[in-house]
Each structure stands twice: as C-alpha cells, then as structure tokens.
Amino acid sequence: MLFRTLPKSEFTSMMQQMLEAIEVIAPKQVGVNAKGESIHQFLPIQSVDQMDLEYSYTDLSAKSYFMPFEEVLSTFKFEGKDWSQEITYWSQPRAIVGLHACDINALLKMDKVFIKEFFPNPYYFARRNNAFIIGIDHDPCEGGFCRSLGTDSVTRGFDLFLTDLGDKYFVSVGSDKGFNTLQQVKNDEVTDKDTQEYLEKRRQFAKKEQPSINIKNLPNVLDMEFKSDFWKKWGDKCLSCGSCAMVCPTCYCYGITELASMDFKVSRKTKKLYSCNLLDFSLVAGGHNFRPERENRLRYRYYHQHRGFVESYGEPKCVGCNRCGRVCLAGINPKDIIQEIQTEVKE
Amino acid sequence: MTMYFPQYDVTKDDQLRRPLDFNSVATLKHVDRAFKAEILNVIRLTEMEKLFQIRVIDEKERELFSFLPGQFTMVEVPGYGEMPISISSSESRKGYVELCVRNAGLVSGVLHNAQRGAVIGLRGPFGTHFPMDMMRGHNVLLIAGGLGLAPLRSAIYHVIENRAEFKDAHILYGARQPDQLLFAYQYDEWRQIDDMNIQIIVEHPDANWKGPLGMITKLLDDIQFDPLDTYALVIGPPVMFKFVCNKLSDRGIPMQRMFVSLERRMHCGMGKCCRCNVGSTFTCVDGPVFDYWSVINLIEAI
C-alpha cells in the first residue's frame, strides 16, 4: 500500500474538482432525531460544505448505490405477437465518499457474492467499477461491534482511505485511480512523525469501549441450538417487518417482479431487495411455506449471517455496524442474540 | 488540470461480448437475457398439468442451450414474470425442451393459456443434474411420485436412449389417483422396450383402474437388485422420497447413491436472490439434485 499525507485544504480542493467532474455521494446531515443527534444519510452533494465527514453513523448503509432497492433488470417491448428484450447497465462514474471501514468491508463481502462467485453479476459489477471510493477512519460508533468481527479496519476495496491527523489526512492509496486523483492536488510524502501519529490514532480507536460479541465456534453453536426455545422467544418479539434487511449493508436477497405498462407496449422486469423475515420469502407454488413462523425466519436470518455465509466464504456476513439493532422496532439486536445463544450452550 | 474518472462500460467487457452461455458459470454474462423460444406444441396431460414443447428460435443459440437430465430452466413469460421449471425431455436435442407445468400460480396460469406459436423466453439451464455418468454400468431405480415424474422423465429418456449402458432398469411411479398420472400415454411405449420394468401405482383407484393400489413403497417389495450395484433417483414430494429412500437404505443402497430433487421458488437461478437458500446451500446452484445423505444433513431442507 502506498501512503501519503494530504493537507485538509488540499482535500477540500480535491473534492471541489471532483464535484466538477462527477457525481459525488457523501454523508449529509438531513435532520436531527428526538435525542438531538444528527441524522446522516449518503446522498448526492453539490458542494463540499454539504458533506459531513465527522458523522457517527448512517441509519441506511450506502448499499443502494451498488444494489438499489429497485433496479430495472430488463425491459420487454411488445410488437404484435413478438417481443424484444432490452438491458442497460449503470455506466456513470461517481464517487462515494466517507465510507467507514465496516461499509467497505461490507462491499468486499458483496464482491464475493456478486463478482467472485458463480454467475458474476454485470449489474453489480458495472456499479462497482464506476464507483470511486473514499473511506474514512472514525471513533467507534455507538452500539457497533465491528471489532469482534474484524471489520474495524480495512486494507482494500477503496481508492483512497483517510485517517484524520488534525490539520491533514493520512491517506492510504488503494488504486491507480486513487493515486491519479490524489496527484491532482498537493500531497506529501509520509514522514516518520506522520506514521507515528497514524499508529497512535489507530491505537486510540482500538482502546475505545465497544460492545463485543463472541463469534468463536458460532456456526456450530447455531447448529446445536437450531431447535432451541430461544428462537421462539425472540421470534415472538419480531414484527417480521424486514427493516433489518433494508438497512443491512450486506443483505442482498431479492425478489423479481414484472409489471406491464397500461398500454401493454412495454413491461419492466424489476429486482427489488427483499427480506427473509417477510412472510412469503420462502413460499412455493401450491402454497407451502418453508418458514411459516416468525421464529423460523428470524432464525434463518441469523443462520445466513453467521453460519451459511461462514460455510461459503469462511467469514460471517455481518460487519457489526449494528444498523439492524438500531432500526429494530421490537428491540432485537444481534449483540443480545449472539451473546445469549453463546451462553445458552455453556449452561 | 482536470480530474479524469473513466467511464466503465461493462458491455465492452470481453466476457460479455461472447455468446450467451449459462453453462459457463464463471464468466460474466448477460445474466437476465433470455433465449427467445417458441412453443411448438401444447399437450394436455391432466386437469392441472400441460406439457409444453418448446424450441429456442435462433439456431446458434440452440447449440448453447444444452442441458443434462435433472436441470431446470427459468421460463420467462414477458409481461408476467419468470418461474423455475425442471426439464422433462431428452438432453439429446439441444435447444429443445419439454416442460411439464402445473397451473399453480400467476405465471404458470398465463402459460397455460398460451397457444402454440407463442414466443416466450428461456434462461438457463441451471442447477445440478442426475449423475448419469456415475450410474452407467449399474442397475438403476427411477422412482417418482406425483409431479416428480416431470424431472425424472429426462433421466428415463437418457436410460432409454443409452439402454445398453445400464444393467436392470426399473421405473416406479405413484400418484394419488389415476387421473393425476402424468405421461400416461407413454407407459405402454416404455413397456415395449426389452428389459424395462415399469410399475404404476395409485392410492385411490377409479372404476377403471386395474393396477396395484397403495403407496409407492409397496412397489419396492417386488423388486430384486444388488444394493451395492444400484443407483436410485427418487423424485417427488419430501414425504415420499423420505419413505422411499429410508426403505432403500434398509435394503443396503448407500445414501450417496440415492438422488433426490428439491423444490424451491427461485427468482434468479444463479445463487444470488437467496429465495431458495437452505442454510448455506442454494437449491439453484448446489441443487436441485442432491444425494440423499446431503439432504438429510441439510436442516430445513425437507
């Protein structure tokens, strides 16, 4: 990895130039919640001052820029008894700025599913390759448990990654695109002092209090507890609303719907992100539902996150951002579930 | 100096410019592009099921639509949607498939209204297949219950077309009642073939039924085979294949030599949408054909 330092004034200038060249998505304050805390979202910005890199967390992840909640996969055009199919892919370069390590790790996990697996997906691939990613280091956010999952730091998957050193950024350069962009403004060689400051900063982050979960042996524990009453208890709380999947940076399951226009001249085949907590997720023809109860579906969600994904890719799907925990109306959060299921086994 | 962010056009990727071939699973391809295909014939099988004989229209694309027994295809009915259907025909005709479809939902309902000449779309083929190569040189038990004969029929064709390569072949098929039997017009044809044993059983007879009565497991009692020289394909609802496989297991066939096919409502067919996910197993890419050992070790599978 190549490292540079970038004065903050030069960073602003880099962002200004970037705004002239391409669309820039960045954390933007959109309001204040009941507790008086800022609400941030990843949104297109028009000027640098709209961007707030000091944000703590966003309720929604930035996944919609890679896997939109709704995406037209193809369009059918009808002519008499015949039809033709048109497919378009995303082709506009854009920058996604201010992603935290957990969100970049989430993208790396999605790359495994959508690029490095069977049937690489051109829709995702096109969006991913058009995205210029600038990540940023931050104090651990409230409720997050990324350290337990090893997603509190990241060494790839971005073009540039910033660590705040006061009046300048310590920059990790992750790609040639990143290097070229950085070269448009004045940046400096890293001195020993910079490196010391950077490492000290990382140490500070690591010292901050953070909830922890024990994922050791979790796939086996989950298997052993498959029939535990535990799931009934949590399942009874679950409202099956699917919010957890919507905010999750790595929940990617979907459904496909097709809708014809009123004049029957065109029909759009649309991919919509779904949630395994929704009632009809595993409904099949003839009316059989493989996961009819809330507890079955909630359990499945945790099995996919912490068992299935581990089996397929050797790591959990979860990045520990706790977005699902924050958004859940029933107060279900992964920290409690995993802690409880791990203790269940000891007893 | 201005910043330069190159536009990335995925359609210029070499892999995407190759002819669409779903069998090359590792390459980037237009995953949602369907082969245009024409319905050549519609055959009514029962009150609920019709057989559609379908051919990919473009001759070059026909070559690329090659499948193996047990695989399925995503049938696109433009304007309505897509559904996964297992292929019922012989793999020897490329780009030509016969699909047995039960009228069970929106898309299948629309397809049931389609006439010959209608143009639909096919994506695929997808999924694992019956291990016909491994079965070669052994006895084969081809066992189906209900709609399970639809995917099994492609394996039956394979055995018939390559009969000399297999030892004893038994086809056992059971349905609830005689009017639900699929492909009834073909049994006599299959019976004419030397050394093919075909047994049909129903649970509830009608006035004309003269065959055996009961569950499909009953047919197994009269069949002799060397369990260590026999492969079984057991296709049907989980309750059926569980009973049959357990019985075959008792008679000594290793579980890894019994194959079943699972059913889920796939939306993509490519291990992405997760709709058919069982634990970490995707019915669409790791299945639908599994050996029985894998299935009983798959929680929530059946």
Image (tube, coloured by chain):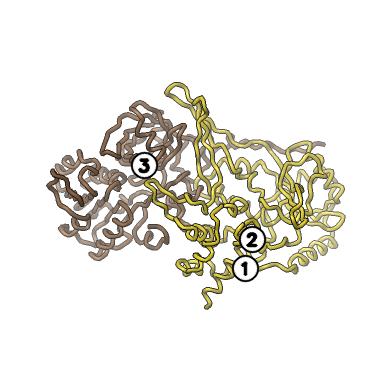
Chain colours: A yellow, B brown
Question: Helix, strand or loop at disc 3?
Answer: loop
Residue, x 63% and y 54% (percent of image)? A106
Write down the residue under mark 3: B104
Q: Chain of mark 2?
A: A
- Residue identified by numbered label 2: A320
- Mark-to-mark CA distance, 1 and 3: 45 Å
Q: Residue at x 77, y 43 (%)?
A: A181
Q: Which mark identifies residue A213?
A: 1
| Residue B301 at x, y percent in the picture | 40, 57
Residue furthest to the bottom in view is: A347
Residue A179, above or below A305: above
Per the image, label 1 sits on a secondary structure element best described as: loop
Q: Write the residue at 13% across / 44% down.
A: B207
Horizontal relation, residue A344 to residue B128: left or right: right
Q: Chain of mark 3?
A: B
Q: Is residue A293 visible?
A: yes
Counting residues from the N terminus, which is met first, the one under dot 1 or under dot 2? 1
Number of residues whose C-alpha sits closer than 10 Å to that of mark 2, classed few (under 14), some (14–19) or many (20 or more): many
What's under tag 3, amino acid-wise? Ala
Determine whether label 1 and label 2 are within 8 Å by CB.
yes
Identity, as a three-letter code, of the amino acid under mark 1: Ile
The residue at the point 77 percent across, 48 percent down is: A29
Q: Is residue B130 above or below residue B40?
A: below
Label drawn at residue A185: none
**Residue B102 point in image, percent of width and height:** 33, 41
